[in-house]
Amino acid sequence: MSRGGVPEVDEIERVKETKRTRKAKTRKERPRIPTGIEKLDQFLQGGIPQGSWVFIAGEPGTGKTILCLHIAYSALKEGNDVIYVTTEQPFRDLIEQAQQFDISLLSFLKDTLYVVDLFELWESAWEAKKNGRVKVADPLDPDNLANYLRGICQEQRLEAPLVVIDSLSAFWVDKPAMARRITYRMKLRLARLKPTVVGTLQYAVTTGSSFGFGAEHIADGIIMLWIDDVQKTGEIRRHGVIKKMRLTNHYRKVFDYDIVEGKGFVIK
Ligand SMILES: Nc1ncnc2c1ncn2[C@@H]1O[C@H](COP(=O)(O)OP(=O)(O)O)[C@@H](O)[C@H]1O
Ligand SMILES: [Mg+2]
């Protein structure tokens, strides 16, 4: 209703409210990369928000690498480009491990999966040095890794790839106090690629906390994994929690999981 062509306050409010609701409805939801683990995807409202840096943190044997394999496979199946940086095991070992969980990465090689195998890079750096090249790029220098990744994206014309870095801790192995600075620098240097990054952080068995200081502060998301004190429980009992995930009303409780032959990471 209006008086003399002037809308009443109520009417103005109603129109404003309609506009607000319409805006909210048309606001684009951030696309997500599913992890491929059904329950974890439910916990994450569909998966990892594209463009975020997510760290999987935990002690050795908690399943960080296996979780990376699941996420990479799921992203590939969704049609994403994936760059997989492996510093802990040669890629051929990962392929073998993945096969035990029915994860077949091989078919994506030379298509949408690009592998940065530190073992191979190390070998070629060594060869170059042997052949008298004075300046050889150190594969464990985080700036070199960033350049390398940028090179792949440029050459292959990749946009917003998923970059798996297993492990990030390898890049500060001799300077743990620099972990935060190294990660931050990497984030800045890779920003132009608009990547989604899944990186693993190693937790020391002795202290149960991060090896390297402060890298977590750079994270948009942290999934933490641990095993109960086996000396008390007499068996391996695995637990995890989503400690942080920006843009996500995520599950907040500790979950139990296991690693199962033929299936991989299974949340109970
Ligand atoms: N085929 C398999 N079936 C069941 N569990 C397995 C199998 N292969 C490995 N595992 C479990 O996964 C663990 C290794 O997981 P991994 O992801 O490599 O750990 P992290 O990267 O955290 O060190 C092993 O210690 C073992 O408990
Ligand atoms: Mg590992």
Image (tube, rainbow, N blue to C red):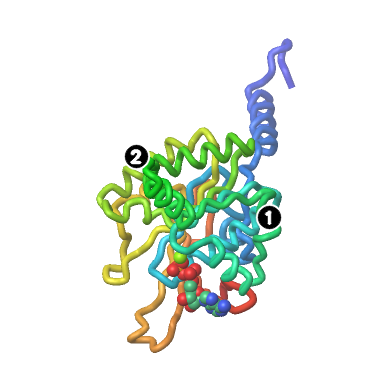
- The answer to whether 119 is drawn above or below residue 19 in the figure is below
Left or right: residue 214 compared with residue 52:
left
Q: Amino acid at mark 1?
A: Phe
Q: Secondary structure at mark 1?
A: helix
Q: Amino acid at mark 2?
A: Val
Who comes first in sequence, dot 2 or dot 1?
Answer: 1
Residue 189: quarter of image: top left
Look at 44% across and 57% down and name the residue there.
87
Q: Which mark is residue 153?
A: none
Residue 26: quarter of image: top right
Q: Residue furthest bottom?
A: 234
Look at 66% across and 60% down and name the residue there.
106
Q: Position of residue 177 (x, y in %)?
A: 25, 50
Q: Secondary structure at mark 2?
A: loop
Look at 64% across and 32% down and name the residue there.
20
Quick check: is the Cβ at mark 2 less than 8 Å away from ligand 2? no
Q: How many angstroms separate mark 2 from mark 1 (CA)?
A: 36 Å
Tell me if mark 2 has few (under 14), some (14-19) or many (20+) residues whose alpha carbon lies within 10 angstroms of its own: few
Residue picked out by circle 2: 134
- The answer to whether 233 is drawn above or below residue 146 in the figure is below
Dividing the image into 4 quarters, which one contains the C terminus? bottom right
Camera-side residue: 241 or 131?
131
Dividing the image into 4 quarters, which one contains the N terminus? top right
Question: Taking the image as drawn, is residue 90 in sight?
Answer: yes
Residue picked out by circle 1: 108
- The answer to whether 162 is drawn above or below residue 134 in the figure is below
Residue 211: quarter of image: bottom left
